[in-house]
């Protein structure tokens, strides 16, 4: 499975961004898909997950501000609202299909 994340950029605190992950195969055939992020000097953390059935879970740090969803069969989005400087990180999309797959990350920078 090949994954490509896009939509990152520079935004002021309180602003919004929408990330898109495009997959090379249907996301519905995958066991799980998620968004992770990694800030400088920190470990990679999972911020949101969506199952093939559409069940979503979020980390406490983004709950109520971020929304994960699927667009077409091969796209997954992360709508990020009320962004904070601490959301600054490289964001990665992830899928599991017998093995873990990672997309190339997209940089999100939130200025104060």
Image: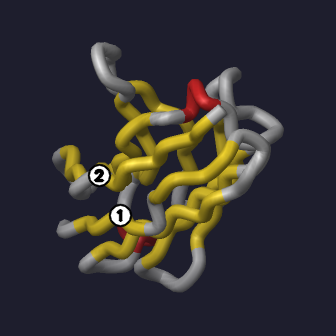
From the image, which quarter does the N terminus lie in? bottom left
Q: Which label number is shown at residue 105? A: 2
Q: Residue at x 36, y 30 (%)?
A: 38
Callout 2 environment at 10 Å: few (<14), some (14 to 19), or many (20+)? many
The tag earlier along the polypeptide, 1 or 2, is 1
Q: Secondary structure at mark 1?
A: strand
Depth check: give the residue in front, 29 or 10. 10
Q: Residue furthest right?
A: 64
Depth check: give the residue in front, 70 or 4. 4
Q: Residue at x 34, y 15 (%)?
A: 42
Depth check: give the residue in front, 77 or 85. 85
Figure disc tally: 2
- Is residue 55 visible in this depiction of the protein? no
Callout 1 environment at 10 Å: few (<14), some (14 to 19), or many (20+)? many
Disc 1 + disc 2, Cβ < 8 Å: yes
Q: Secondary structure at mark 2?
A: loop
Kindly indicate the quadrant of the structure image that contains residue 22: bottom left
- Compared with 84, 100 (above or below) is below
| Left or right for 84, reference 95 | right
The x, y position of residue 102, in whole percent, is: 23, 50
Q: Residue furthest bottom?
A: 72
Q: Residue at x 60, y 30 (%)?
A: 85
Q: Residue at x 47, y 58 (%)?
A: 9
The x, y position of residue 51, in whole percent, is: 54, 53
- Is residue 20 visible in this depiction of the protein? yes
- In whole angstroms, how far apart are the C-alphas of marks 1 and 2? 6 Å
The x, y position of residue 23, in whole percent, is: 32, 73
Question: Mark 1 highlights which residue?
Answer: 5
| Left or right for 93, reference 2 | right
Q: Coloured how?
A: secondary structure
């Amino acid at each position: 499975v090949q994954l490509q994340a896009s939509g990152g950029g520079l935004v002021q605190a309180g602003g919004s961004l929408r990330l898109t992950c495009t997959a090379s195969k249907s996301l519905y055939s995958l066991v799980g898909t998620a968004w992770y992020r990694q800030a400088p000097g920190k470990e990679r953390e999972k911020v949101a997950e969506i199952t093939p059935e559409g069940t979503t879970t979020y980390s406490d740090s983004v709950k109520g501000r971020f929304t994960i969803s699927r667009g077409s069969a091969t796209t997954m989005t992360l709508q990020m609202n009320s962004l904070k400087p601490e959301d600054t990180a490289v964001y990665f999309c992830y899928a599991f299909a017998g093995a873990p797959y990672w997309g190339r990350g997209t940089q999100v920078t939130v200025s104060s």
